[in-house]
């Protein structure tokens, strides 16, 4: 396609060039900082409850701790969520389901592993059937404890938000502008 503009002529695929320009503009410093701030306060977790840590996650979302003030609003459908919170033991069977849920999530997506079982297997550490989430998913934050307190979950949310705002977790080169 050819486009003329005041004595200038560009030859090539204008749609592709416009997309590259849009990606370049969105990834510049002031706009990127605003986007990172928006992403960090729009953490919508799909909770993947496989053990007792689910009760502590529920307590974090309850009125006493009010995780919504951090921009942390639990959803149930993985296609609207950008944060996978693995709560507890992950078996081989559930690891396939965790990958399936993770692949359905939109970009940018993050993973938090919660509890001693999610970190190293917990009391099931020597079982043949346990999978560590870090072996199959890119875990951003680990929450230690058995089960971890709601305060630890809130601290993990804040740590994840700081990592996002620093630009450590969002891959800018891979993100594309949608038509």
Image (cartoon, rainbow, N blue to C red):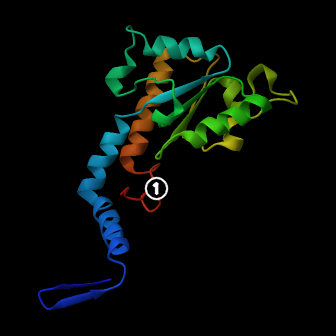
List x then y, in percent, for residue 133. Answer: 68, 36
Task: Please give left or right for residue 79 compared with residue 121 in the image.
Answer: left
Residue where numbered disc 1 is placed: 171
Residue 155 visible to the viewer = yes
List x then y, in percent, for residue 41. Answer: 34, 34
Q: Is 14 or 69 nearer to us in this picture? A: 14
Instruction: Assign a secondary structure to mark 1.
Output: loop
Residue 149 visible to the viewer = no
- In the image, residue 165 sits, relative to residue 87, either above or below, namely below
- In the image, residue 166 sits, relative to residue 124, either above or below, namely below
Where's the N terminus, which quadrant?
bottom left
Residue placed farthest to the bottom in the image? Answer: 7
Identify which residue is drawn at 37% across, 38% down: 40
List x then y, in percent, for residue 123. Answer: 78, 19
Q: Is 16 or 57 nearer to us in this picture? A: 16
Q: Is 88 or 98 nearer to us in this picture? A: 98
- In the image, residue 116 sits, relative to residue 179, either above or below, namely above
Residue placed farthest to the front in the image? Answer: 1
């Amino acid at each position: 396609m050819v486009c003329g503009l005041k004595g200038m002529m560009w030859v090539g695929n204008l749609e592709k060039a416009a997309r590259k320009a849009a990606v370049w503009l969105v990834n510049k410093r002031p706009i990127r900082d605003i986007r990172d701030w928006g992403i960090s306060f729009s953490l919508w977790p799909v909770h993947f409850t496989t053990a007792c840590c689910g009760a502590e996650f529920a307590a974090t979302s309850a009125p006493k701790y009010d995780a919504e003030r951090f921009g942390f609003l639990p959803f149930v459908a993985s296609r609207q969520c950008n944060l996978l919170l693995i709560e507890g033991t992950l078996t081989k069977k559930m690891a396939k389901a965790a990958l399936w849920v993770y692949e359905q999530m939109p970009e940018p997506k993050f993973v938090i592993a919660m509890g001693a079982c999610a970190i190293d297997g917990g009391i099931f550490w020597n079982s043949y059937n346990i999978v560590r989430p870090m072996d199959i998913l890119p875990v951003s934050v680990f929450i230690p404890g058995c089960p971890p307190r709601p305060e630890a979950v809130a601290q993990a949310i804040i740590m994840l938000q700081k990592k996002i705002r620093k630009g450590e977790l969002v891959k800018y080169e891979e993100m594309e502008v949608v038509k």
